[in-house]
Amino acid sequence: MINDSLLKLNVQLLREVLEFKIPTDALLSKFFRENRKLQFTDRGIIAETVYTILRNYYKLSTAIEIKNTFTLIAYVWLHYLKTPPSELSKLKSIKLAVIETLPRVNENTIEFPEWIKNRLSKNLPEAEIKNLSKAMEQQAPLTLRVNTLKMSVSEVHKVLNAEGIKSELTKFSPFGITLENKADLMRNKLFLDGAIEVQDEASQLAGILLEPKRSEMVVDFCAGSGGKTLLFGMLMKNTGRIYAFDINERRLGNLTPRLARSGLSNVYPQLIESENDSKIKRLHGKIDKVFVDAPCLGLGTLRRNPDLKFRYNEESLLQINEQQLSILSAASKLVKSGGKIVYATCSILREENQDIVEKFLAAESDFRLIDIGQIPVLEKLKLTDSRFLTLSPAVHGTDGFFAAVIEKIT
Ligand SMILES: C[S@@+](CC[C@H](N)C(=O)[O-])C[C@H]1O[C@@H](n2cnc3c(N)ncnc32)[C@H](O)[C@@H]1O
């Protein structure tokens, strides 16, 4: 419920968020742990306020000084969360009359910092940048991937419906289901039985690009918590072998319970020190398919993590570009002749995507880019350039995502 103490708590959190030292989702979890007594609805108001401010930061700056956090929050409560003025007038820490006389925001403001806007404008017309910015201001839907080794998509859809969880099948992915509203599924039987996993449709589509087959040897080079590893395991019908590499022990550790739920027994997680870890050498030239879900600035996920655009700069881009190329080169040593690599990121910057693939190909004459226009599932996407999978919230309603398929010729 809106009152002065909720406003003060919200201000306290917002000030920390706006330092951009710690990811907002981590700060929010910590804040709620420290304020256990906060009611569910109050938590909702606090989270929505913070995310609304991050998503509309530049717009809000056209009407208010962001550092005036009390005024800013009251303004957001009035105009975005649609709190009735009669409720706001009860607050002692703000003057409603002042909030009401503040100008309205300029709705056409682009919600990217200058350096991102400049980078994007090298390859995109202004109208497309505006559409992208608008699309990134929306909340991302919650999308599930059905584990078809356990249940069919239509069976899961029916169960969700019967439970009153409204959902629809994804437009492009053959095993995706999008929920109409957010729902906590962590204790749902479908989830506990491994019949569903949370995974954005863009990730599902990028995973499909690898086309892993029964009995193949596959490496998921940057497996993280294994979102795509699990998808590959399912596509391979729990046959063959998938090595899931990552340098982050905690993330790779999260794969263990997911594997147990999925019922897969063809996955071998392997913690590595770096992309050049000597443990990997024994697999050189032996792998059919390698997926490189490279670390990136994550700007394709701004709907979920709007703070990312404030936490990075040109320098971060240059650093990540070095890592991306180094990881792709190391991963390429694993594939055998005729084998495939998929290089993917959840970024919308050409510098992390096409440019990395092109630099790699310029240095490695044994590899070539494969056209992806013929992959049946992807035909519906109507890609403008069939050499690259480029997904956008503005066009496809998915996270922003990039992927390219590279083949080892000899
Ligand atoms: C985009 S995330 C992967 C997400 C995961 N594939 C999924 O689908 O859920 C990138 C991952 O790369 C890992 N990473 C960073 N540097 C790496 C390296 N040199 N070698 C292997 N993995 C690395 C990070 O720890 C992170 O988990």
Image (cartoon, helix red, strand yellow):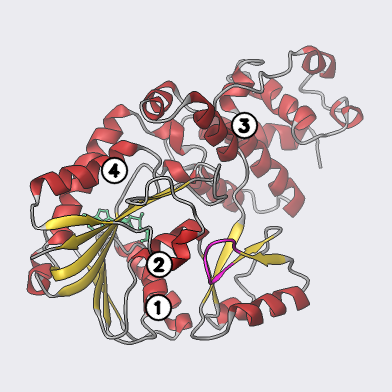
Disc on res. 53: 3
- Separation of marks 3 and 1 at Cα, in angstroms: 40 Å
Foreground mark, 3 or 1? 1
Q: Residues within 10 Å of mark 4 (few under 14, many from 20)?
A: some
As measured in the structure, the alpha-carbon distance from the residue carrying label 1 to the one carrying label 2 is 8 Å
Q: Name the amino acid, label 3.
A: Ile
- Residue at image mark 4: 354
For marks 4 and 1 on the same chain, the one whose residue lies earlier in the sequence: 1
**Quarter of the figure with residue 196:** bottom right
Residue 252 found in image quarter = bottom left
Kind of residue sitting beneath label 4: Gln
Left or right of residue 221: residue 29: right
Q: CA distance from mark 4 to mark 1?
A: 27 Å
Distance from label 2 to label 4 (Cα)?
19 Å
Callout 4: SS = helix
Q: Residue at x 31, y 28 (%)?
A: 314
- Say which label, 3 or 1, has the lower sequence index: 3
Q: Is mark 2 within 8 Å of ligand 1?
A: no
Compared to residue 323, the image places residue 146 above or below, namely below
Q: Find out whether the residues at labels 1 and 2 contact each other: C-beta distance under 8 Å.
A: yes
**Marks 3/4: CA distance?**
32 Å
